[in-house]
Amino acid sequence: MANVELQKARVRLFQKADRKNAIVALSTVLLLFFGFIAFLNLIDSVSLGFRAGQRPMERFLNWFVIAILGFIGPYGFFLAKRHREMKLIERRLPDFLRDVAEAGRFGMTLADAIVVSSAGRYGKLTPEIKKMAAQITWGVPATEALRLFAVRVKTPMVARIVAIIVKSSDAGGDVADVLTMVSHDTKENQMTEDERRIVMSTYIAVIYISFMVFLVTIWILNVTFLPKMLEASGALEGEAGGSLGGASPLASNLPEVVYNIRVAFFIATIVHALGDGILAGVLDTGKIPNGMRHSFVMLMIAFFSFLIL
């Protein structure tokens, strides 16, 4: 029976892995599809711009940004959703361990304590507790049910807690005291992590604010400084034509220089959005992939800002 339940848990685990692989495949397809369109616009084989009169480089950058958004969007938000679900499960785990420990102090075995505690409400953790209680009712040993629980949830915290409980049960010690200590230690770790996230949220807000300041600075340069340069080039061209009978080289090349500056601004904004998003993810959860959703939000803001400009 235990082997059958372990096999079922592995099947569910593979199903979760399949969902992740499907999201990665979808993101990769979107990246390649829009990247191919961007390449066609770069070599000027097609002309799919978002505004009239766009040059190949502008069209390429627009579709290149869409390709990046198509990759980091689905995968980034999938990782964020899974991370949030795991945290909700871990959040109620100390309460469950405390209830099991209290039941054990009344003389119940570990298996009976888990079955009795399964009647409680533990949020996202409740379905997993119900599965453990059902497995124990069917004759699966309590330690094996805990291992199956760790296989289903598969987080470092749950794996560590289950390993401690299983070792304590196999050693024949007082499992209730061990459960109490593990519950207290887990609660303390969660409180420490909450404090760290509160502190880091300030830095994440600073990252978003600095990115918006960067965008506003580019907007000011685009609407004030660069048009003045074009006006100055027209004045120089008129003055040169009237006094010297020919156009000034500086005046004739200045529109191209202004265009290159705007392209450089756009590229700098793309790099800024991706880098700031990754940094925000590292500060938030300590993992680079979890910063993809921040990069997606910043890149969307930058993309629509430049479309408006």
Image (spheres, rainbow, N blue to C red):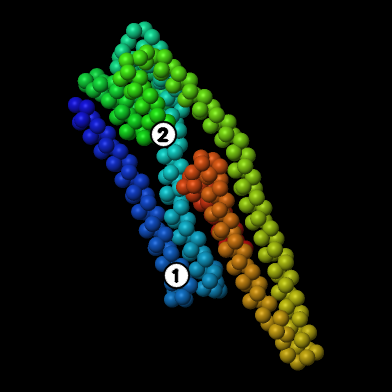
Q: Position of residue 195 (x, y in %)?
A: 58, 31
Rounded to the nearest angstrom, the CA distance separating label 2 from label 1 is 42 Å
Badge 2 element:
helix
Which residue lies under the disc numbered 2?
156
Q: Residue at x 62, y 71 (%)?
A: 260
Q: Residue at x 29, y 23 (%)?
A: 143
On-image quarter of the N terminus: top left
Badge 1 element:
helix
Amino acid carrying label 1: it is Phe
Side of 215 relative to 157 (left or right): right
Query: Which sits earlier in the primary sequence, circle 2 or circle 1?
Result: 1
Quarter of the image where one finds residue 107 = top left
Q: Position of residue 79 (x, y in %)?
A: 43, 44
Observer able to see residue 281? yes
Vertical placement of residue 279 versus 128, above or below = below
Amino acid carrying label 2: it is Pro
Residue 39: which numbered mark, if any?
A: 1
Q: Position of residue 252 (x, y in %)?
A: 68, 82
Vertical placement of residue 171 versus 54, above or below = above
Tell which of 237 and 98 is nearer to you. Answer: 98
> Between tags 2 and 1, which lies in front?
2
Vertical placement of residue 216 versus 235, above or below = above
Residue 218: which numbered mark, if any?
A: none
Observer able to see residue 302? no
Q: Residues within 10 Å of mark 2 (few under 14, many from 20)?
A: few
